[in-house]
Amino acid sequence: VRNSLISGNETIKMALTIAVGGRVWRKFFKTFPFRSNSALKRFPTCRANGRLYSTSSDVVLVRKDEESGIATVRMNNPPVNSLNPTLMVALRSCFEELEKDKTCRALILTSQKPKVFSAGLDILQLYQKSPDHVAQFWEKVQDMWLALYGSRLITMAAINGHCPAAGCLLGLACDYRIMAEGNFRIGLNETQLDLVAPFWLRQTMIDVIGYRQAEMALMIGALYPSDKALQLGLVDKLAPIEDVQTVAEEEVKNWLKIPDQARAITKMASRKPLLDELRRRKQEDIQTFRDETTRESVQKSIQQYLEKLKAKK
Ligand SMILES: CC/C=C\C/C=C\CCCC/C=C/C(=O)SCCNC(=O)CCNC(=O)[C@H](O)C(C)(C)COP(=O)(O)OP(=O)(O)OC[C@H]1O[C@@H](n2cnc3c(N)ncnc32)[C@H](O)[C@@H]1OP(=O)(O)O
């Protein structure tokens, strides 16, 4: 599925879309439905209206520049932006609101707390929890990823610190990654916790750094320092930590010179197969995650990992 870029029918649909001029975006969204409206209603909204705006829970801060159409989305879940249900729902809601905002053209995803972009999934949510809890948790991961990976916007990760596991998942879902120079690490270290990255996350890693490097990185659960990540193509640019945001804004401005429509259609042409595959296999993926994570041996590994984290101090 992954290798067949886009079917003949879809290519014709896209060509028609381009041909109809004024109604182009309506057709475009019909061809590539990014989100479900019913799902939107279930989540807290986060309007980006030109001033610093925070969601009801304050875990996501959004500032949109009305002139340029660039929104900066800051994760604000101290101490390490671990992705708990509240943060994931707020992120998803935020991505979807920005998607709907016709004046928004780009989003920069970053951390409010420099030195840690995100510590990945909240491990405590995976430890000694009921299968139902774990299943619901995983659906939130999927939905957050679908909203970001399937976004029509220019998406840029301003990785201003450590970026392991699901932190890296967020970065990989973006179009471009700028990371802080220095002693910060990024990668998919799931195997170190006895977890297996799901097919859609593995695929994005392969798409970004190529098969051989991705296979190796995933097997050993590698966390790379930023210079090595640059060399592998896991990130696209490095900047001093205090400049990551500015460099991201400059990069977005270059991307804004490309017409939105052609850029977004091109992006969707390459991402649609994977988006569709996850949508199709969503329940199967949830069941696998639930069954794997609640397995006794995995629970033991998670417990040991948590103990190691605590013992660090
Ligand atoms: C076929 C498919 C089958 C199955 C699928 C199964 C799995 C799919 C996997 C899905 C993909 C994603 C997985 C994940 O994201 S798992 C999370 C992995 N994350 C990590 O390994 C990072 C762990 N954290 C760190 O390394 C450091 O905290 C970090 C980020 C480098 C920052 O270091 P530092 O600033 O020194 O901060 P501390 O380590 O002191 O941490 C402060 C505080 O936060 C707690 N904490 C850290 N990380 C997490 C976390 N991820 N979840 C929950 N809590 C975390 C830490 O314990 C400290 O707590 P304290 O109470 O001691 O203050």
Image (cartoon, helix red, strand yellow):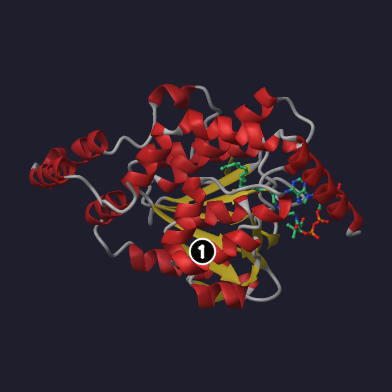
Q: Name the one closer to the observer, 19 or 233.
A: 233
Q: Residue at x 68, y 26 (%)?
A: 131
Residue at the (70%, 49%) spot, across then down = 194
Q: Is residue 21 left or right of residue 112?
A: left
Q: Nearer the viewer, residue 36 or 203?
A: 203
Q: Position of residue 234 (x, y in %)?
A: 51, 67
Residue at x-position 73% and y-position 25%: 130
299 left or right, relative to 278: right
For the image shown, how many numbered marks are present on the structure? 1
Q: Is residue 19 above or below residue 225?
A: above
Q: Determine which residue is flagged by label 1.
A: 214
Secondary structure at badge 1 equals: helix
**Residue 59 seen in render:** yes
**Picture residue at 51% right of the left edge, 50% below the top:** 201
Q: Position of residue 145 (x, y in %)?
A: 49, 43
Q: Amino acid at mark 1?
A: Ala
**Residue 108: percent from left, percent from top:** 49, 56
Q: Residues within 10 Å of mark 1 (few under 14, many from 20)?
A: many
Q: Work out whether residue 245 can be spotted.
A: no
Instruction: Look at the image and tell me in which quarter the C terminus lies.
Output: bottom right
Q: Farthest front residue?
A: 297
**Picture layout, residue 75 above or below residue 96:** below
Is 21 on the left-hand or right-hand side of 295? left
Measured as percent of width and height from the top left, residue 39 is found at 46, 25
Q: Is mark 1 within 8 Å of ligand 1?
A: no
